[in-house]
Image (cartoon, coloured by chain):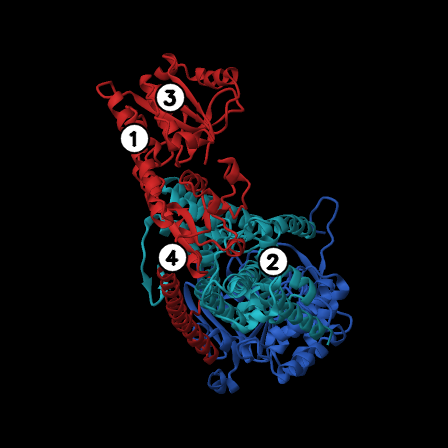
Amino acid sequence: MGDYLKAGSGDLEYSILVEGVSLSIGRSRLLDDVSLKVKRGSMTAILGANGAGKTTVLKCLLGLVKPSSGRVEVNGRDVNLYSRVDLARELAYVPQLLNASVSFTVLDFVMMGRYAYEGGFGYQDKEGEGVAMDALQRVDMSKFIDRKLHTLSGGERQKVCLAAALAQESEILILDEPSAHLDPRQSEEVHRLLAGVAESSGLTILTVTHDLNWAAMDYDYVFGMKDGRVVAEGLASEVITCDGLRALFGVDFTIVPHPDTERGMVVPTVRNREGGIS
Amino acid sequence: MKGNVKIWCLIILALVTVFVTPWLGERSIGFDVLARPFTMGVDDLDAVIFWQIRVPRLLLAFLAGVGLSLGGVVFQAMFRNALATPFTLGVAGGASFGVALWVQLGLSFSILGIGGISLAAMGGAVFSILLLYGLVRASGKSSPMTMLLGGVAISFFFSSLIMLLQYLMDIGDSFRVIHWLMGDIGRANLDSVLQVFPFVASGGLIVMYLRRELNLLSVSDEIAASRGVNVDGVRVVLFFAVSLMVAGIITVCGPIGFVGIMAPHMCRLVFGANHRVLVPTSLIFGGVFLTWCDTLARTVSVSSEIPVGIVTALLGGPFFLWLLFKHGERH
Amino acid sequence: MKLFVNKSLFRLSSGGWFVVVCVLVLFVLSHLGRSWVRGWSAEQAAMYAEKRSDAGQFPERLVGLSPSNVETLFALGLGDKVVGVNRYTSYPAAAADLPKIGGMVDVDFEQMLILKPDYVVLLESQRSLVQKFEEIGIKTLSVNHESVEGIVSSFSEIAKLCGNEERAAAICDEIREHIERVRESVEGRGRPRVLICIHHSTDVSQPEQIIVCGSGGYHRELLEIAGGVNAYDGPVAFPKLSRENLINLNPDIIIDLVNKKVVNERSRDELKGLWNVYGELDAVKNRRVVIADGAEHFLPGPRFLKTLDVFSEGIHGVKVERKSTILKHFEEGDIE
């Protein structure tokens, strides 16, 4: 059903187009004239303090929240014109760390990513299982297919979620803080996998993250949000600067070049005894 | 493969249940009655007991078990709470109130062959679901506690309304309501089996069709939506299916508690959480479970029988508490 | 907040349409099935009815499905034909030993079939059971024990079935005559407002959880025959009264029906003494609380004249002599 929609999207420059989106709930204004464009095949990060409206933007993209005004387009078509199934074929979503009480087996959970391609009555085709196995292979979890999700570590769970989103075979991947609650090793694994996926498959990846260094290292393009507005956008090296971070978080960081790549890494600024900045 | 063996065991258990329980009872009956269905006349006592008492009863108990178990599965997935069933969340109370109100008003009509009393039960069930769902939405967080307490409040609300009605009823109606409130499978006949059948079968069919959606809903609404589930629409359809089953069962059998918690949970322990398997297995196991409860209820005392609702409650109460404590530990 | 837009609620896939069609077909099929089953049941019932008229003889095996019906059967001299009784039956002694087939609303249908009764006599308030009896080929006779006229006619209805109408006629005459004599004896006297208490808790220092006769049952009628009026005149059949309700009603006389035999005079005084707590009531002030004990006061069967006598004596102090006839013998446990 979704094929005719996909047809025209072949040579679009931007996979995601958000234009002048505002959203108010009651008196609070969650989003205020937000515009962002995500280039096809790019890795884009959204940075910002908690409550800046990052997750709300994702919800608008997923069609979970209808903005009060403005336009949200995915692959050149208004989000609200998609049916749920069609949208799922364009756009996959990896949520924040999955609740530990979900007790599906890994393979079952990844197969659930195939929802948009299956018929009713729980019908599953062999092809779908191949896709799921392939996705698990890509995140290096194919040894775990019979394990229950709740017996896995946080990092492994996150990798399974990533596999489930890959099994959805969509062009765009949206992630909400993929490394939240993970320890450094798990976080490294997830980000490495993500960068690998982006490189090998050419997916468009849009990530909400607090992980400034990973954003600086892997991502092409960065949006900075504050109080429901986009206050900064540009290449990672343009946004993740001392001034840029001060504007976003109201805190001073020091930027030093990475020894290997020369990309700017974020480190805490040393404070003197009196609490001022040295 | 191991999973397949378990499923075969369940199927064999179901067949054994269906073919053994009608032979259990005070009076022993020979196998020759099988050749004499629909015997007319009281001369052939064995055939009458077998075909007009025990078999309809078996069928009704099985159907009710299927519906109640599925109702539990659906609610547990949608509310993501192991203790959620149409009974603990007050939907059965709403349906019961619908029936009691119908009896009190003494109305009698039917639409398209569906008795008005079933429609009244359906109305009560839908109303209480709306109430519950509104409550969950309004409180923002659907924490297990909020939901269970809300369900308890709704149950109490409806049961006091039923008591009020009963207070105002004449003795005959009051008897009827008391009898029915105890969970009444004893008066089963072919007609009542056929009355319940379309409700449970349609509800079951809908739930079977929406197994993949149940899987996704049991993870989270957001994930379900992002995978392509029309969450609102599916939820409405599932609520409708549960109301259908609960209303159909409550109209004839009265409220029978705890089946919706015990059967799905046991199946989850054995077959895992995937609704692709969980739905059909809980469906069968629910039927098997309630059939044995009813067999116990009618054979355990000599001169009369205890209502099946008492048997399920005696088994289910401790089970519920065990689950509550187990559940509490994990969070 | 409006969550989950993209409503395409009723856009169904082919599988969805299949389910909808199946659901409709299921309901239609079951409707057809039910009408067939009903037709078959009606046919069967007609056959039973034919058999009944063919038989032409009186039933030999009877079941009384309520204690009052069992008593009625025994009073009619049909005791030797009774094969099963209600679980709560305690009188006459011979009936209490018979096989029990269930309570007021729960019946062991299998046991019932095994006993092979020709007829089951039940109360109209047990009407929800009738259908199932008819299906399994057991004939039923419903009697109304909620009014005095109903009790009287229940004798003739049962007798008509069992062929001892003479005895029933004698019993009915006896009842009617006695009622008439009670009515005459209280004529011209005042009509005090009486409260008939059918239940209260006795294990506490004062009557609590008081349930009285309201608009339902035969007690209200007996009360009017005995020359009183019901102090409660609301719509509820058997209302439960609080102390405040009692004060508002302020009955002239309270008749306290106690469901068990009071063993001696002392315990009777104790029961009466419970009411002293409610000293503000005229009935208590004027020492017009009457204790009537015994299960018979709750049974609308052949012993209900005893209740009438208690009422007339309690209200007006009139003691109308009973002629020593059938019911009197029955009351004394003397069944031929």
Q: Please provide percent x and percent y for residue A34.
A: 48, 65
**How far apart are labels 1 and 3 at the CA level?**
15 Å
Bin the neighbour count of mark 1 within 10 Å (Cα to Cα): few under 14, some 14-19, many 20 and up: few
On the rendered structure, is A259 left or right of B285?
A: right
Q: Dot 4 falls on which chain?
A: B
On the rendered structure, is C252 left or right of B15?
A: left
Look at mark 3 in the image and give the residue it sits on.
Answer: C254
Q: Which chain is red?
A: C
Determine the secondary structure under disc 2.
loop
Q: Dot 1 falls on which chain?
A: C
Look at mark 1 in the image and give the residue it sits on.
Answer: C233
Determine the secondary structure under disc 3.
strand
Q: Nearer the viewer, mark 4 or mark 2?
A: 2
Q: Which chain is blue?
A: A
Amino acid type at circle 3 is Ile
**How far apart are labels 1 and 2 at the CA level?**
49 Å
Q: Are marks 4 and 2 on the same chain?
A: yes
